[in-house]
Amino acid sequence: MKLLLDSTRCQGYGLCQEPAPELIDLDEWGYAQVLLSDVPAQGAGAAEAAVAACPNSALRLVK
Amino acid sequence: MTGVHSLLPEGQPGLLVSPVFGAEPHRGAEDLARYLATGGYTPLSSRDRLLDRIAGLGLRGRGGAGFPAAVKLRAVRDAPGRPVVVANGEEGEPGSVKDRWLLRHRPHLVLDGLRLAEALTGAGHGCVYLSDPLTEQAVRNALAERPTALRVDVVRTHPAYVAGEESAVVRRIDGGPALPTAKPPRPFEAGVGGAPTLVANVETLARIALMHACPDAAAAVAAAHLVTLSGPGGTDAALVEAPAGTRLKALADLCGHGTAEAVLLGGLFGGLYGPGWTDLPLDHDRLKAAGAALGCGALHFLRPQDCPVATAAEATAYLAAQSARQCGVCVSGTGALAGALTAVARGEAGEDPAEKLDRWSRQLPGRGACGLLDAAARIVATLLTHFPDRIGARHGSGCPACTHVVADDGRRFTVTVP
């Protein structure tokens, strides 16, 4: 599973980071940075939560 | 006045000169009769043979990324749907002139390459994408007299740094703004109208046409490069075709830049290189191994009185101004890099400006929808690598070259098309 960020959609809400701190970091301006785009099986739930948390649909998971 | 020179061995076919007509570069636009006399528009008897030749000789794309041309052609050919092929003549790098020169002077060579790319991929139609009015006129004249009946549209855009990025090209041809989109999908998967799309730099297409017309010289044609050389403000500039492996010193000597202290490579994309640049070879892989990048082949030389900090400050300020402003991280990142370098140049940086510049240069690459942010980060990273002693809090107060750093319009890097 791949976690993809469309950086043209990321508005820096920062809501994605809390449910998936091992997959996503926020930079000093608040924009999301994907740390691990190849999501391991045990991270699937966190990745899905991060995708769902973004108010602007900037994140998606691709099988 | 930008010069035009060929460094190819006498008699070797090239893009600037045709041995058929002697050793002088083309003047004016090459018309159909003259192009046919060089072996142009010869029927393609075997698609596989030409594609194998392109693959075997390792032709790289000339837009900047240096991706293997055959891999891209095969990916477009094999993707589901009827492909579209695009000749990308929108030369966004201010320090590069090769693409506009080719389309203005040898439009048939590019259109012939587009015709071959159509055949190699099984495309239904083609498109020439550009912004320069003189270029457009030359292309339209050539299309009117061209001997093939394939449909080719001309799509015009406004000139901008990102307008030639392949996803921006697709978006513009589809009627939108010429701004990059997030990947995936890449154009080879879903491009113009959703069809698999080959977006090929015009020099790449010209090389394919010449490799088809001159099979005996194909290896040398695939290996040669068009490069644009210049100094600050577009001075002592030249468009040159040179064999692969040519030392950068030999190129610099052609237009009086042999004593340069540093060079900015790949337009604004390949970063700065300090002492030692003279021994670098004109070669994608060897430049990459040396921590540099050839990009579109534009080389900007810094005279001994030019400061790398001033150059980097204006380059990053230009990139910040040219940001498509779609990605927040690009707006913030390029703004921070340019702001910090300008502060160093003015002697207004706080303590240890190198620390945050270093952090940003590692943190920002790969995070925008296109490569603009990567270009700005690479300029900063290479400035820190090659000129670490210039990034001090007090640099600007003692540097005469840094006192006038203001321009964000790219004027330092802009070269006039010969």
Image (spheres, coloured by chain):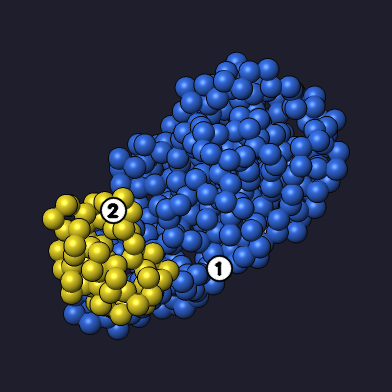
Residue B333 sits in quarter: bottom left
Secondary structure beneath label 1: loop
Residue type, label 1: Arg
Identify the residue under disc 2.
A2
Residue type, label 2: Lys
Residue A58 sits in quarter: bottom left
Q: CA distance from mark 1 to mark 2?
A: 42 Å
**Is residue B336 visible in this depiction of the protein?**
no
Q: Which mark is residue B132?
A: none
Q: Which mark is residue B411?
A: 1
Chain at tag 1:
B
State the image coordinates of residue B363 (x, y, percent, origin top left).
25, 64
Task: Report whether mark 1 lies on the same chain as mark 2.
Answer: no
- Find out whether the residues at labels 1 and 2 contact each other: C-beta distance under 8 Å: no
Residue at 37 percent across and 59 percent down: it is B374
Q: Which chain is yellow?
A: A
